[in-house]
Image: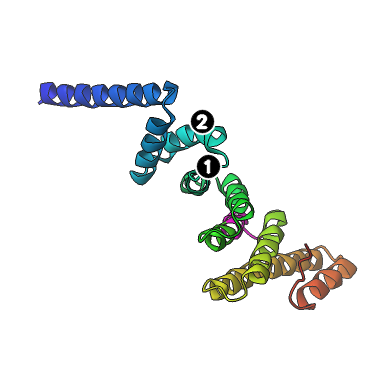
Amino acid sequence: MFQSRYYFILIIGFLVLASCSKHQKILKSNDNEVKYEAAVDYYENGDYYRALQLFESLMGVYRGSSKAEQMYYYYAYCYYHQEEYLLASYYFKRYAQSFPKAQRAEECMFMSAYCQYLLSPRYSLDQTNTYEAIKELQLFLDLFPGSDRRETCHQLIDELRAKLEKKDFEIAKQYLKTEHYQAAIKALNNLFSGPRIIRY
């Protein structure tokens, strides 16, 4: 039994080494077509880390070509699938700005805002990202008023605003506990002043 487990681990080790070796060979290759095909293959198989490395090495090569649009799209999603939401948001927005007439421009603009939503922390922490997410979702609604994603955006904005309201309420409670009544009144006024207007 020990021997069969040993052989199994050995085989897995060889496969990992062979896979790494193949990837490094492709990464160092001067054949951009081979790199591009491998990057797409990695992406479609869920290996976003390796796909990202290859797309990164090709960004300058294919800039302005017919493949650039597809590459930017994959590139942004590679970051998204690795939960690098700040970078994903940036590249989704960059895609939408670089290819405003593209079929996927609306999707990428929404994904940029959605990544900002995912960056919003729990209510007790600093809410800068929450304000940014609301701003980006409202911007999406302004740019694509007829979008099928409109209702989703409204739901996300409501959720983010509820988080801000909860923060104001908890702050007011804390001020009341510590007998800072003027500060408590101010925090409660923030809470009851209605929906927050985010300017951009």
* Near-viewer residue (186 or 31): 31
Please name the amino acid that badge 2 sits on.
Ser
Secondary structure, mark 2, is: helix
Work out whether 80 lies above or below 161.
above
Where is residue 130, by image quadrant? bottom right
Q: Position of residue 2 (x, y in %)?
A: 13, 23
Q: Position of residue 145 (x, y in %)?
A: 62, 75
Q: Position of residue 133 (x, y in %)?
A: 65, 60
Residue shown at 43% from the left, 25% from the top: 27
Quarter the C terminus occupies: bottom right
Work out whether 186 lies above or below 31.
below
Secondary structure, mark 1, is: loop
Work out whether 142 lies above or below 62.
below
Q: Is residue 23 left or right of residue 59?
A: left
Alpha-carbon distance for marks 1 and 2? 15 Å
- The secondary structure making up most of the magenta span is helix
**Residue 65 marker:** 1
Mark 2 Cα-neighbour bin, 10 Å: few <14, some 14–19, many ≥20:
some
Please name the amino acid that badge 1 sits on.
Ser
Nearer to us: label 1 or label 2:
1
Where is residue 182, by image quadrant? bottom right
Sequence order check, earlier mark of 1 and 2: 2
Q: Position of residue 63 (x, y in %)?
A: 57, 39
Q: Which residue is mark 2?
A: 57
> What are the residue bounds of the magenta stretch?
112-124
* Near-viewer residue (166 or 182): 166
* Near-viewer residue (121 or 118): 118
**Residue 120 marker:** none
